[in-house]
Image (cartoon, helix red, strand yellow):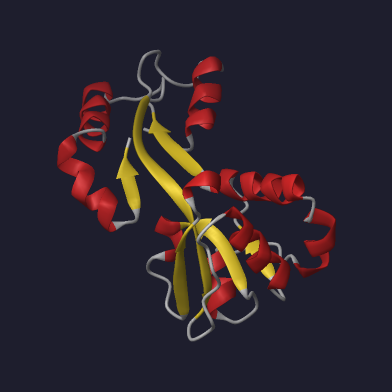
């Protein structure tokens, strides 16, 4: 079983690495904003407030995954990408750890990745108008030796029985 973002599953299916019909969307993960513990909390009430928070931040970091790519495009759409480029800290490690060390004043990453990081404050999710949600899917590899067990796992991941665990980790059922 593999479980990357949905678009990656589609590529694996198209390349013949997964069994046809085995794709299951199982969880949605949205982006949240974090600051170092004890730092003032920026306003995230609407798109313009988030834009102002980004412009005011002395340093910013994004995930290197699909959500980070989408946020970088948002900064381009706002026309501020070049202006904030010198203050961007490339995340070679999880964004939350950079925020916790004080290396970054404003971090953007999926809520599930920030929830358990010590030394940060989660300000909140991005407002609905600009929220970036990644759907994670799973599929069964063509070389799987236990196809039935893999399909049972995927069925459980997509079932209501797993909803509470997803919500505790800052995600929502797909």
Q: Nearer the viewer, residue 131 or 25?
A: 131
User: Which residue does the image show at 63% across and 44% down from the upper left?
Assistant: 70
Task: Say if 2 sits above or below 127 in the image.
Answer: above
Task: Say if 98 sits above or below 71 in the image.
Answer: below
Quadrant placement of the N terminus:
top left
When asked about the image quadrant of residue 102, the answer is bottom right
Quadrant placement of the C terminus:
top left
Please identify the residue farthest to the bottom as the structure is shown: 38
When asked about the image quadrant of residue 155, the answer is top left
Q: Visible in this render: residue 91?
A: no
Q: Position of residue 21 (x, y in %)?
A: 36, 14
Q: Position of residue 35 (x, y in %)?
A: 54, 74
Q: Position of residue 129 (x, y in %)?
A: 53, 45
Q: Position of residue 169 (x, y in %)?
A: 32, 56
Task: Tell me if 162 is positioned left or right of 142 in this view.
Answer: left
User: Which residue does the image show at 55% across and 72% down from the upper left?
Assistant: 42
User: Which residue does the image show at 20% across and 50% down from the upper left?
Assistant: 164
Task: Tell me if 164 is positioned left or right of 59 in this view.
Answer: left
Q: Visible in this render: residue 174?
A: yes
User: Which residue does the image show at 48% across and 86% down from the upper left?
Assistant: 38
When asked about the image quadrant of residue 60, the answer is bottom right
Q: Nearer the viewer, residue 46 or 140?
A: 46
Please identify the residue farthest to the left as the structure is shown: 161
Task: Tell me if 124 is positioned left or right of 160 in this view.
Answer: right
């Amino acid at each position: 079983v593999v479980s990357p973002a949905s678009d990656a599953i589609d590529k694996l299916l198209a390349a013949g690495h997964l069994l046809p019909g085995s794709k299951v969307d199982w969880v949605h993960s949205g982006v949240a904003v974090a600051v170092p513990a004890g730092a003032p909390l920026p306003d995230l009430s609407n798109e313009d407030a988030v834009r102002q928070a980004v412009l005011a931040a002395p340093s910013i970091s994004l995930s290197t995954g699909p959500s980070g790519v989408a946020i970088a495009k948002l900064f381009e759409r706002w026309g501020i990408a070049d202006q904030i480029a010198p203050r961007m800290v490339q995340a070679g490690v999880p964004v939350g750890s950079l925020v916790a060390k004080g290396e970054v004043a404003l971090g953007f990453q999926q809520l599930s990745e920030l929830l358990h990081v010590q030394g940060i404050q989660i300000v909140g999710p991005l407002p609905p108008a600009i929220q970036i949600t990644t759907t994670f899917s799973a599929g069964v590899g063509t070389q799987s030796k236990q196809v039935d067990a893999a399909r049972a796992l995927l069925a459980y991941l997509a079932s209501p029985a797993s909803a509470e665990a997803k919500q505790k980790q800052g995600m929502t059922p797909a």
